[in-house]
Amino acid sequence: MTTEKTVDQYIEEQRFAIMSNPECSNSHYNLATALLGLRKFDEAEEEFKEAIRCSPNFAEAYVQLGGICLQRGDIDGCLAYNQQSVKVRAAFAEGWGNIGFVQMQKGKIDEAISALEKAIKYNSNFIQAYATLANAYLFDGQVDKSIAAGQKAIEIDETFAVAHNNLAIAYLEKGDTEKAAHHCHRAQQLGYEVAPEIVREIETARAV
């Protein structure tokens, strides 16, 4: 689906599939994701709900509905849908990762950490979960755990700038200004805009 024309063709194919078999949850889900790509949120929402009606344990559909809620600024709706996703599939890493992200936004750090630890348990390569977990640990004062999570993220992908930024802050908290400077510089190299106060704090610490 590289052009609008092919997206439209794909949508028509899925609509035809649904006409042939209205109870096919995959066809409803595929149609919904295509509509989502065109930012037709209301139509996509209805199709994701149809996918769930046809298959109540369709965890991915709950996550997508949560994403639509987040797009609308409905953070509680996003949380509820993701909670439902892990209710129907307990080991669904993406659902746990999203729960952790939302709980961070709500300032519920303990709940965020609990969810994110489950996310990485069920998917040991879930880089976004490691990065968010590193941030959550840092908020909670668990600096060494924050560094460990950040290091795991860059083991998965050394170019993940957010993880370098988190590591810069964590090492600064730990008093290791050289490592803080290294990760700050790497984050900047990768196009991440490190907070000016962090840059100044590192430069001041290194000048002492």
Image (cartoon, rainbow, N blue to C red):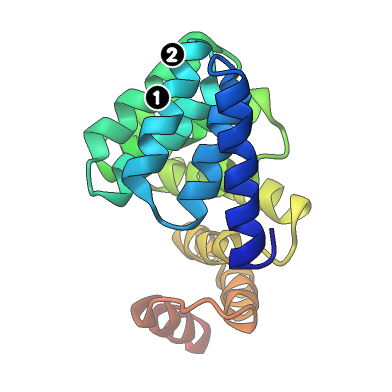
The kind of residue on which mark 2 rests is Arg
Q: Which residue is mark 2?
A: 53
Q: Is residue 115 above or below residue 36?
A: above
Tell me which residue sits at (50%, 34%) in the image: 97
Residue 19: quarter of image? top right
Alpha-carbon span between mark 1 and mark 2? 6 Å
Q: Which residue is mark 1?
A: 49
Position of 46 with respect to 131 (left or right) is: left
Position of 208 with respect to 15 (left or right) is: left
Tell me the element at label 1.
helix
Q: Is residue 49 above or below residue 2?
A: above
| Category of crowding for the residue at label 1, using alpha-carbon neighbours closer than 10 angstroms: few (below 14), some (14–19), many (at least 20) | many
x, y percent for residue 74: 22, 41
Residue 82: quarter of image? top left
Do labels 1 and 2 touch, CB within 8 Å? yes
Residue 149 in sight in this render: no
Tell me which residue sits at (61%, 51%) in the image: 150
